[in-house]
Amino acid sequence: MKTMKKLVSVFVIVCMTLALFTGFAGAAGVAGAVQQTLKSAAADKGFDLNSMDDVHFVDAGREGDAVTASLPHDLAVSGRSVAVAVVAVDKNGNALAGHAPRFVLGTFSAGRVTVTYQETGCRYFAMMPIQSFIEQGTIHRLTTDANKVGSMYDIYVEAALCMSDDLAEYVVVNKTDERLLNMRFTCYLENDVINAGHNAELNTNFHFEDPHGIYELLEDETYATDGGLVIKYKLDRDTWASWRYTGAAQLKEILQTEVVMTCNARESEATLRQAVNYDNEIWTYGTLELTYEVNGVNREIPAVSVETFLLPAKMDYIVLDGEPTHVPGHGGVPGIDTEEDWLDEDDRALPGIPAELNGKDHVAYIIGYEGDVVRPNNNITRAEVATIFFRLLQESVRDAYMTQDNDFSDVSEGQWFNCAISTMSELGVLKGYPDGTFRPNAPITRAEFAAIAARFDGREPDGMARFSDIRGHWGAEEISRAYQNCWVDGYPDGTFRPDRDITRAEAMTLVNRVLHRDPESPEDLLPDMVIWNDNRDEDAWYYLAVQEATNSHDYHRKSNSHENWDTIEAVPDWAALEK
């Protein structure tokens, strides 16, 4: 196991020109004092002081602007991340009172460390490379947004956390060790708006999404502070106890599933105006800390050489005046610059059924489990989704694209899902990952499912959906297409939650919308249909969708275009078709 180093790290994503201070070359006393400040801070965090380099002074050009520095360093391996200590200083190089040192993750190449940093109200910085760092994980995605509502702004922050490969491997190897329950994960979200002084309501407007139930949120230790928001959680004991029956590969995949934290609050424009920099931006920082606690004291994690390490996070910013802005480094949403480019409710309409799909025959495309259950609230895997759409293809389309061959390294002949995945990939509807895998047994996210549906349409959306959390997301365009087609909806808080795993009930609802399979009420069904033990509540929002997806039936259209069932039909022999 590689040594896990501790690190408080903040990623920033806006790069600006580096300018060296003037008049510092001979200021040995000043440089020595600030170097001692950074050295002491690094020692407190447990960094290797033998690897420290010289201090360097940089100028961002204006207060609050970001600066990218290229610092000489000869103690790292090329391509390796390097921890850099940073502190804000005045124009004479003296550390500013009230501004504590921070630790930023830079990238080493060809004898230099490149690092980007920004701090509100500060222009000058002292930076010092410290040591190489082996990344153990990341805040996978950090998104902030401000939407104008009357004279106020709704502030939204989302952080998606992902356990590193090394840490997941460590947990898998030691999965029966009860001492894992002493690990504590703490996420810090910080900007000049999300803090206790402005937003006590953040304590109640906070959501923690953990699709596999891996963690227990420590609600008494999740709170707003003067610096921002602190979220603390640990491994769930009941879930941990079940791991002894979970295979290594499956457990590792589960552990590396994103956990999403969101918070929102309403703030006045005057308060936001006080916090913005010259470019009308509010920067948000995020860090993730892992500690091992015994009686409140940090201890060494077994087989790990230090007791605390922090995972690097990215950073985003809020732009005022309600105009969406391309976020450098996040892909952005090209061409979305004005109010007219956003989709309104009037822009939405249910299109015709895609030509490739069989919308005429209402076959049962979902098969239940033993015990007469269908598990509507469980996740659905990528392989299962491929199988659904494979079953729903027009017979002529399926015959034309039927194949057992694909380019995915983890899908091969003989696996139950091979034919479905290979055929849908050949059709161009399914995509894999950059590493050449398809990850058939991984749960599918809301964005991935929406993208599959949108690929059956092929048209570009007329604008972007107004969800507060899709700007810059890889699936923003596909989500917007599916939203414009009335195939998907968001949540009451204005989010879509694209990286949240979709449930089986949500998947059935989306598929039914695409195929116009829409009974209006339980009275439109038949008494001799299959009824599931976990879908007997006719008031459940998904009741009709699940019954529609799991019963083959003939039907007719009512005057309002909803369907009414006529007879129950036999379920096709899917197993024979999918061989």
Image: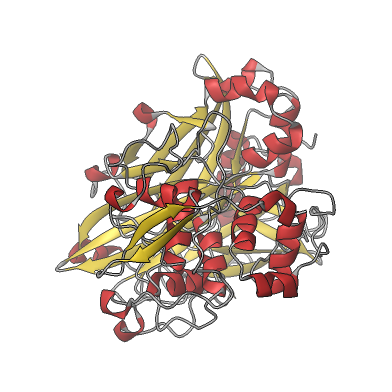
Residue 95 seen anywhere in this rendered image of the structure: no
Q: Is residue 197 above or below residue 255?
A: below
Q: Residue at x 35, y 27 (%)?
A: 220
Determine whether, in the image, residue 234 is placed left or right of residue 509. Answer: right
Could you tell me residue 576's position as x and y percent?
74, 52
Determine whether, in the image, residue 62 is placed left or right of residue 349. Answer: right
Q: Is residue 401 above or below residue 500?
A: below
Question: Closest to the observer: 453 or 521?
Answer: 521
Location of residue 438 by image quarter: bottom right
Could you tell me residue 103's position as x and y percent?
57, 49
Q: Residue at x 50, y 34 (%)?
A: 373
Location of residue 242 by image quarter: top right
Question: Closest to the observer: 361 or 33?
Answer: 361
User: Can you name the residue that lies furthest to the top here?
Assistant: 295
User: Can you name the residue that lies furthest to the left here?
Assistant: 151
Q: Residue at x 32, y 37 (%)?
A: 537
Q: Quadrant location of the N terminus?
A: top right
Q: Is residue 383 above or below residue 304?
A: below
Could you tell me residue 575's position as x and y percent?
71, 49
Location of residue 559 by image quarter: bottom left
Question: Closest to the observer: 79 or 391?
Answer: 391
